[in-house]
Each structure stands twice: as C-alpha cells, then as structure tokens.
Amino acid sequence: EVQLVQSGAEVKKPGESLKISCKASGFSFSSYWLGWVRQMPGKGLEWMGIIYPGDSDTRYTPSFQGQVTISADKSIFTAYLHWNSLQASDTAMYYCAIPKVAPDAFDIWGRGTMVTVSS
Amino acid sequence: EIVMTQSPATLSVSPGDRATLSCRASQNVSSKLAWFQQKPGQAPRLLIYGASTRATGIPVRFSGSGSATEFALTISSLQSEDFAVYYCQQYNNWWTFGQGTKVEI
C-alpha cells in the first residue's frame, strides 16, 4: 500500500527549531517529487515547495524561500520540513504529498502534522 | 504567480441537488487543473486531475470540465458525505490553489 506517514503533533516556543518528517512506503521514494502544503487554522491550502529525493533537487514557492528548508534522506525513505527559528505565524497543519496517479497531480497525501508555536 | 479564483465562497444546497463550483485562472493553465475535497480534520483528497479525469475511486457523480482559464466541478446529485470544502489547483506553472468553496446544507 502506498503511504505517507507523518510525524506527530508538535508544540514549540517562538525561536525554537523544528524538523517534521514524512516517511514513504509502498512506492519508489526516489522516483517521485514530494510536495509540502501548509494550512493555517481555518484557512486554505498553500503550496510550499517540492523535493525530488532521487537527487535532492528542491524548489520553493517564493514566499516560503528562506523561511523553511525541505530535505530528504532516500536511504530511509523520509522527507523533512525544517525551521531554524519558529514564529507564531508558523502555527499550522503541514501536509506532504506525492503525484502517484499522474505527473504533477498530487493524489497521495499524509495525514498532516500540526505545529503549534506559542509562548 | 498564477492566481486561482473560486466561486462562490459558500454554496448552500440540499441532498440530491446538483452543484456546480467554478474556478478561474489568471493565466492559461491548459488542462493542468485539479480538484480536491477536504473534510474537517482530514487531508485533502484528489477528485479530478487533468481538468476532467476522475482520480481512483472517485464516484461518477463528480465531474470536471473546462480548459485554459475557466473550469467547473459538478456534483450531479449531492450526497451527505459530499458536504465539504473544495479546492481547485493549477499545476501548469508551479502549483497554486484557489481559496476554496464550502459546500454546506
């Protein structure tokens, strides 16, 4: 079964660092682009960026460039989203997704990781 | 950046009704258009890709149409489980979502 399993909810303070994960199974992890999507509380979906685990080619939506780092370790089939210094505005649900059914059509999604940043 | 605009913001309907949701792109996206359904507490689910192709396991009551800058998602006969928020997304030039349409009773 094709699956993306995301790490558990996090509660952090402003200024702290954080890395959340998305572990893949049931498909060739290195061969599919993997995307990250943000959903702030009560709001819509925002595309953050993508990574190709095969060669770690990474691209960002301009508004997220420099705010987060997307990475992957293909040896353990896991992608990551990393913050150096969290802000309250990073409070959101974060989803990872891959396009299994067709190129660029992201049909397989993780269940999401809720990140809460509060002092 | 390609801006996706969905209308209406909220659609009030009854079970059994036909519902049509609209999505407009600020530039030509060809047929690189997807529709997602999201229920509270759940991840988005892909319904339609390529503007009109149903994803695996999606009921036939969901259909997509359009090309270039004008798209629509039609639910032919609303079931109780269809009440949710629907997002369009273009993937012709990067990926951008519309702001969503809430389908409510």
Image: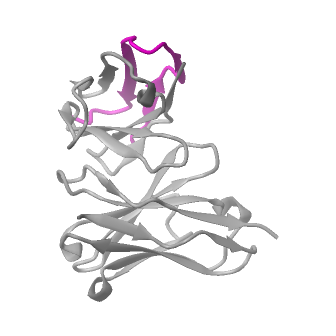
Farthest residue to the bottom: give it.
Answer: A75
Of residues A8 and B8, the one nearer the viewer is A8
Assign the C terminus of chain B to one quadrant of the image. top right
B52 vs B77, nearest the viewer: B77
Outermost residue toward the right? Answer: A119
- Closest to the observer, B17 or A89: B17
Quadrant for the N terminus of chain B in the image: top left
Q: Position of residue A90 (x, y in %)?
A: 64, 63
Location of residue B7 in the rendering, given as x and y in whole percent from the top left corner: 47, 22
Residues in magenta? B2-30
Left/right of residue B40 with respect to residue A98 in the rendered view: right
User: What colour scheme does the image use?
Assistant: one colour
When the figure is inspected, residue A109 is found, relative to residue A31, above or below; the finding is above
Residue drawn where x is 73% and y is 63% of the image: A88
> From the viewer's perspective, is residue B15 above or below residue B65?
above
With respect to residue A27, does B101 lie above or below? above
- Does the segment drawn in magenta span residue A63? no
Q: Which residue is pictured at 62% across the width and 66% down the height?
A: A115
Q: Can you give x and y, in whole percent of width and height, for residue A36 in the image?
A: 42, 62
Identify the residue at horizontal 20%, vertical 30% (top origin): B52
Q: Is residue B67 visible?
A: yes
